[in-house]
Image: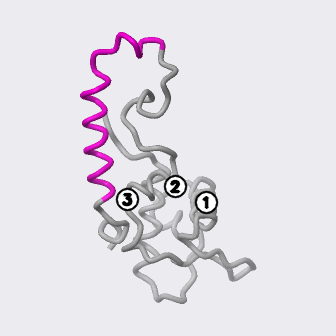
Amino acid sequence: MLKITRKVEYALIALRHMQSKDVDELTSAKEIANQYGIPQQLLAKTLQQMARDNILEAVQGPAGGYRILAKLDRISLKDFFEKLEGPLGMMDCYFDSDCIQIGACNIRTPIQRINDNMRNMFAQMTLQEVTQ
């Protein structure tokens, strides 16, 4: 089953929440976690990672929080997924050829075609489209 990770899910929820606010308004991890029932610690780490990736701006201090920094219409879903979770692929052999069955594998080529199509689809969708 193909599905996005909780980390990506929480990141998308956070971005959508932040988009509903004024541009200069800060949002805390606690606020988002409480409103959507998300584990605050995992969300905080995810928001910190998005700040390191220049998607969010992190403002320190007692009244600090996060706000969207990047132009979400310029970030593809493929790039976003890969920033948060690493290479996007259905099978490990797409990125790593250490599989002991790689020489005899009869599904690698068709799976690579499916994976390429999936990556292309996500490359054509923007983060703005999903979080708006």
What amino acid is found at the position of numbered circle 3 in the picture?
A: Leu
* Residue drawn at point x = 63 percent, y = 63 percent: 48
* Residue drawn at point x = 35 percent, y = 69 percent: 131
Query: Mark 1, mark 3: which one is toward the viewer?
Result: 3
Q: Nearer the viewer, residue 53 or 23?
A: 53
Q: Quadrant of the C terminus?
A: bottom left
- Label 3: few (<14), some (14–19) or many (≥20) C-alpha neighbours in 10 Å: many
Which label number is shown at residue 83? 2
What amino acid is found at the position of numbered circle 1 in the picture?
A: Gln
Residue 30, x across and y down, in percent: 59, 67
Q: Is residue 114 magenta?
A: yes
Provide the residue span drawn in magenta.
Answer: 100-123
- Label 2: few (<14), some (14–19) or many (≥20) C-alpha neighbours in 10 Å: some
Q: Quadrant of the N terminus?
A: top left
Q: Nearer the viewer, residue 101 or 36?
A: 101
Inter-mark Cα distance, 1 to 2: 9 Å
Q: Which residue lies under the disc numbered 1?
A: 49
Which label number is shown at residue 107? none
Q: Earlier in the sequence, mark 1 or mark 2?
A: 1
* Residue drawn at point x = 73 percent, y = 77 percent: 60
Q: Earlier in the sequence, mark 3 or mark 2?
A: 3
Q: Is mark 1 in CB contact (under 8 Å) with mark 2?
A: yes
- Label 1: few (<14), some (14–19) or many (≥20) C-alpha neighbours in 10 Å: some
